[in-house]
Amino acid sequence: MNREELLDAVAARTHMSKRDINAALDATLATIADSLKGGDKVTLVGFGTFQVKERAPRVGRNPRTGQPMTIEARRAATFTPGKALNETLGPENKPK
């Protein structure tokens, strides 16, 4: 599902205009991004948690040449699905 399809689906469920839904989605995503940038985590109970994790520097290989190279440390956004979302997806999605 892409953004346009998401807007259509939410419009069908809520009977709101796509313009209003688009504005709400933009505001929601910007707020989540701002919170993560500030070091906070965002928990949507039943859906999941967005948070930032620190990735340590490590040695990798250039796929073209095979030469070792250093991959710099960075911050990465992660998402951990909540229990209700996992249950919605079914038992085949449980970790082994």
Image (tube, rainbow, N blue to C red):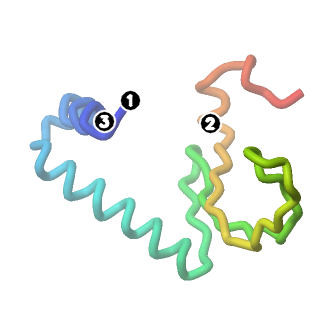
Q: Is residue 49 left or right of residue 72?
A: left
Residues packed near mark 2 inside 10 Å, few (<14), some (14 to 19) or many (20 plus): few
Q: Are marks 1 and 3 in contact (CB under 8 Å)?
A: yes
Rendered image quadrant of residue 85: top right
SS label for mark 3: helix
Q: How many numbered badges does the structure rendering display?
A: 3
Q: Is residue 64 above or below residue 8?
A: below
In this view, the residue in front, 86 or 70, is 70
At horizontal 83% and vertical 71% (from top left) the residue drawn is 57
As helix, strand or loop, the secondary structure at mark 2 comes to: helix
Check disc 1 and give the amino acid type: Met
**CA gap, disc 1 to disc 3?**
6 Å
- Badge 1 is on which residue? 1
- Looking at the image, tell me whether mark 1 or mark 3 is earlier in sequence order: 1
Quadrant of the frame with the C terminus: top right
> Which residue is label 2 attached to?
84
- In terms of depth relative to the viewer, which is nearer, 36 or 84? 36
**Location of mark 3 (residue):** 6
Q: Residue at x 59, y 26 (%)?
A: 88
| Rendering coords of residue 12 (x, y %) | 19, 29
Measuring 66% from the left and 28% from the top, which residue is drawn there?
A: 87
The amino acid marked with disc number 3 is Leu
Q: On the rendered structure, is 35 left or right of 94?
A: left
Q: Earlier in the sequence, mark 2 or mark 1?
A: 1
Q: Which of the pair 84/49 is nearer the observer? A: 49
